[in-house]
Structure formats: C-alpha cells, structure tokens
Image (spheres, rainbow, N blue to C red):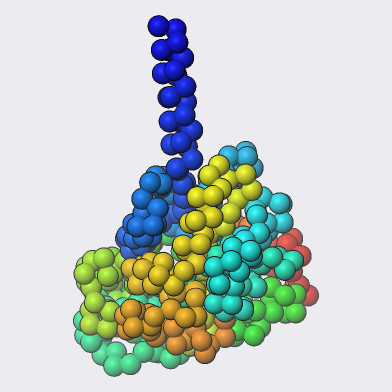
Amino acid sequence: MKKFVILFLSILLSLSVFSQENILEVFSWWTGGGEAEGLQALFNLFHKYYPDIKIINAAVAGGAGTNAKAVLKTRMLGKNPPDSFQVHAGMELTDTYVIPGLMEPITWILKEIGAYDKFPKDLIDIVSYKGEIYSVPVNVHRANVVFYNKEIAKKIGMKKAPATWPEFLSYLDKAQKMGYVGISLGDKNKWTSLHLFESIMLSQLGPEKYNNLWKGKASFNDPDIRQALLIFKDVLKYVNSDHSALTWQDATRMLFEGKAFCNMMGDWAEGYLKTLNWKPGEDFGWFALPDTQNAFMLVSDTFGLPKNAPHRENAIKWIKLLASVEAQDTFNPIKGSIPARIDADKSKYDVYLKWSMDDFSTKAITPSIIHGSAAPEAFVTALMDAINIFVTKQNVEKTFKEILWIAEDNGYVTD
C-alpha cells in the first residue's frame, strides 16, 4: 500500500510539473471591444501551432492600462513576473523595466526568425536600449484622430474634414445647438483628458518643437503650450456633462447611439466601433485633429520577455509568433491598428487602416505622453493629474505654471 501511495504521488508530481511546463501566462489590459477580440484571435493562432500549451489570460481591465500597469509593477518588483506582458514602446518600457534590469534582450529572437529588419527603424529604436531590442512591436496606433458620426456630420453641414481650430469649433457649436454633444469625453479613468490635451499641444507646437521637448532641445516655457490650454478650454464647452462617469468606450459609443457628433480617441476606437457593426467610411468617418494633419502621434503595443519568466520557452514561442506577419495580419484588422511590420499584407486592412498606413509612412512621427512613449512615469502621472484638475477648474495660468514645475522636476528645459 505504501509503495502504491508513493507511486501515485510521484505520478501526480510528474503531471504537475508537466502541466506547469505547458502554461503561458500573458498579461495585458486588452479587455474592451475590439482589443479583447484581437487578443483572442492571437491566442487561437498560438493554439494552432501549440495546441498543448494552456494560455492564462491575465488581462486587467482599465483603459490605457492604468490599472494593469500598477498590478504589473507590483508583480515585477515582487519577482513574480508573467511570462510575457504588454507594454507601450518608449519610456514606459525602458525607464520602468529595462534600465532596472527586469527584462531579457530579445534581439537574438528577431534575428533567429528573420524579422530583425522587418520593422521601421524609428520604431525599433524606441524598443531598444544600448543596442539591444527588449520588446517586439505588435501594432501601431495613431492617437491624434477624431472619429465622427457621418449622419450627424451631414445634418450640421460638414462636407469636408475641418482643417483649422475655428472651423472645428464651429462644427462642435452647430452640433450642440442641434441637441447633440459636440465632442464626447469619458474621463472616468483620467487618462483620456491628457490623451486629448497632448494632441492639442501637438497642434500648437508642431511636430518638430513637440519632439524637441523630450530631447531637451525646446522649452516647456512656450506660449504655444498656454495657447493649447486655451483651446482645450474652448473644447470643453462642448463635452458631455457626465464625462467623469464614463469610460472611453462609453464616450465612443455615444457616436454609435447618435448622441454625439465626434470623439477624439486613438484608433482602437475604430476597432470598437466595428464590434458594434458600424462600417468605416459608411457609418463613421475620421480626420486628424486640426493642425496635426502633418503628424502621426504614435502608440505602439509591444510584448517582452521578463527575466525569470516562469515558462520562458513558451514565452519565447509567444514572442516569435507576435513578430510574424501572420500574427500581425490576424490581430491588427480586428484591434483597429496597423501592423508594426513593414511587409504586412495591406489588402487585409479596411479603408481607415489603409489611410493610417499611408500617413504612418509619410507624416512626422511624434511620441504620446499618456501612452508611455515620450516621458517617464513620474512626469506622465503628474501631468495627468494637473490636466484632470484643469478639466474641472479650467484655470489656464495656474495649469501652465504647474506644467512648468512638473517639467522642471523631471529635468526638462523650462527657461
């Protein structure tokens, strides 16, 4: 009997080890419409090649990863990493995880599968540190996009996309006077207000000066930033009164429900609108925020390999899959983003995403603040808080001074 018990326990132990080896824990914040479906499509593709590996979807809800990032940071610092996790390209990756020594370089993986030269150099640069690549870009989003209800646009007499702020504000005013919300906002999770403001700031500074802020070649003590706050104050006249109770999906849905003329959001909103069975170019349209037509504000979702990943070999399989054309062309048309690879099949993408692809290849690339590309976490958090107070108080001079203090505290030029 004793021998049988020992044999039985050894079998259980071996099965436990086996099952542990056949797990892949993927951490992300993709839980909303479009993004959750895109993630599931990636899981399905992974299972096509590795049917015996069980995927643990460790997604944490919260737009732009506001909740997920806090959970992830705790896990990483507590030496309890997932096998692979979503992280925005840029400072969010390098400042938070690479420089502290929490990640493995994956340059060798991309070289092994022949994908090393299949991504734009500018994009590879912002996922690299000291010559090594630390995450694979899965997609490219454009942040400075306005989506609009085409039926309402027709009612207010909009025949072409507004190119200037006075023109855009006049349409917001017409929509409001006809009983619609001019521009919907859902800042329950705080990040969306900064998402809107950073593109307004880009519109006033222009891409060259905006980019130079992060390189220490331009000063935050610039009247164009004060002007951006004045424009933001004008825009806030046309938002929905319940904005602080809504998520970004709620605000985007207001277009679909015929309650709002437009919504300024990253193009993950395009993926969400498609899950509501709206067709791009027929039910909804889009344009770059006024005075940002010559810029492409970049947001790129990437996945890396943490040091001491519990199931490292499975994580490597996951990263190899994500770097493939097949995975990028599976995921991005659903998510509402364009592929990070330059050799993807353009025919698989809808009319909006083709427009985005064209602009990505021709417009000036600018990094997003709120989505982790431009600045370190301390700067982003402080600026997000200042802009959320501004939404309520709308004190231009006080907020401009606070922006200068935040920039100075983080080592940026302010004189």
Say whether residue 125 is visible.
yes
Q: Quadrant of the C terminus?
A: bottom right
Relative to 10, residue 218 above or below: below
Residue farthest to the bottom, as pictured:
159
Q: Left of 59 or right of it: where is 155?
A: left
Task: Give residue 87's quadrant in the image.
Answer: bottom right
Q: Residue at x 42, y 12 (%)?
A: 5
Q: Residue at x 54, y 77 (%)?
A: 118
Total labels drawn: 0
Q: Residue at x 56, y 48 (%)?
A: 312
- Residue 241, given in percent of the width and then of the height, sits at 35, 62
Relative to 29, residue 329 above or below: below
Task: Give residue 412's quadrant in the image.
Answer: bottom right
Q: Left of 81 or right of it: where is 217?
A: right
Residue farthest to the top, as pictured:
1
Seen from the viewer's position, the closer of residues 360 and 234 is 360
Q: Quadrant of the N terminus?
A: top left
- Residue 79, given in percent of the width and then of the height, sits at 63, 40
- Residue 149, given in percent of the width and then of the height, sits at 26, 78
Q: Residue at x 51, y 62 (%)?
A: 320
Say whether residue 39 is visible.
no
- Residue 193, given in percent of the width and then of the height, sits at 48, 65
Seen from the viewer's position, the closer of residues 90 and 230 is 90
Q: Left of 391 or right of it: where is 329?
A: left
Relative to 284, residue 291 above or below: below
